Amino acid sequence: MTKAIVISSGHGQYVRGAKHYIDEVDEARRVVDTVAKYLRERGATVYVYHDDTSRTQRDNLNAIVAYHNSKQRSLDVSVHFNAAGVTDAPRGCEVLYYDAKQAAANVSKAIAVAGCFKDRGPKERRDLAFTSRTNMPALLLEVCFVDSKADIELYQRNFDAICVAIAVSLAKEAGIVLNVPSQPSPPQKEESNIMPRLLNATGREEAKELIKKAVACGVFQQSHLAKLDTYDDVQLISYSIAYVNRTSK
């Protein structure tokens, strides 16, 4: 089996989805592109699909399913946002599946922890075109609710962490081992005890944000925040991996 992921955004340019505080189609595309970029930078094979041509729901579903089935891959993923009526209250995330219940549970939990969402968990849906007609294990992600003010505030605040959690958890379910992005080695003084940089400035900030989210969601203890600026790159990477691992089980 080819270890690759096909990830598509739900609905299409002319077949719109839910809309309130955010637009489902626009945000699904944003999530898909961010997740794919993260995975590709770490050596994963990822195919991305956005439907820019279909004019009917039937054609849209057929186009998405056909693209997924045209690729050699180990996992099919479609990104959506939920809706159920306007509310200030939190509603949370969930992952729909045909027969991949454990994978759906793992990814839903990872999204929930990264976004501080309520985890609605895996939902069996054998009636959907995407889950039933793709011929590899398929997960339909409902990242959060477009009409929940609390959800959208969390989504916007934790967007990067959510995308990292999705990427890492999907790679795990697809059997893909992610590489650490290579960075140029900095010049080192002879006999220096200074730890070389493994992360660039962006990587350090992203790792710190993951640790902050882990503390906010109760995965790590509060004491990590006081030490955050003292952690070297090895510690930042180690805690980030620990966070992702604990939230994707």
Image: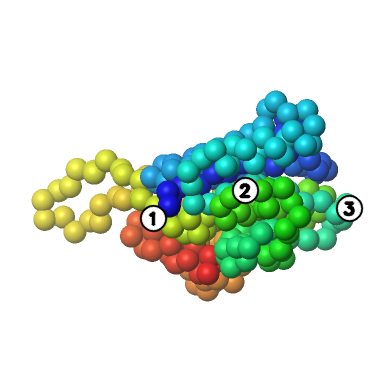
Q: Residue furthest left?
A: 190
- Residue at label 1? 177
> Could you tell whether 187 is left or right of 50 in the image?
left
Whole-Å distance between the Cαs marked 2 and 3?
Answer: 30 Å
Crowd around label 3: few <14 · some 14–19 · many ≥20 (10 Å): few
Residue 89 falls in image quadrant: bottom right
Q: Secondary structure at mark 2?
A: loop
Q: Nearer the viewer, residue 103 or 182?
A: 103
Residue 194 % position (x, y): 23, 56
Identify residue type, mark 3: Gly
Residue 84 % position (x, y): 85, 54
Q: Nearer the viewer, residue 239 or 78?
A: 78
Q: Secondary structure at mark 1?
A: loop
Residue 109 falls in image quadrant: bottom right
Identify residue type, mark 2: Thr
Question: Residue at 68% of width from left, 66% of height from top?
Answer: 121
Crowd around label 2: few <14 · some 14–19 · many ≥20 (10 Å): many
- Residue at label 2? 134
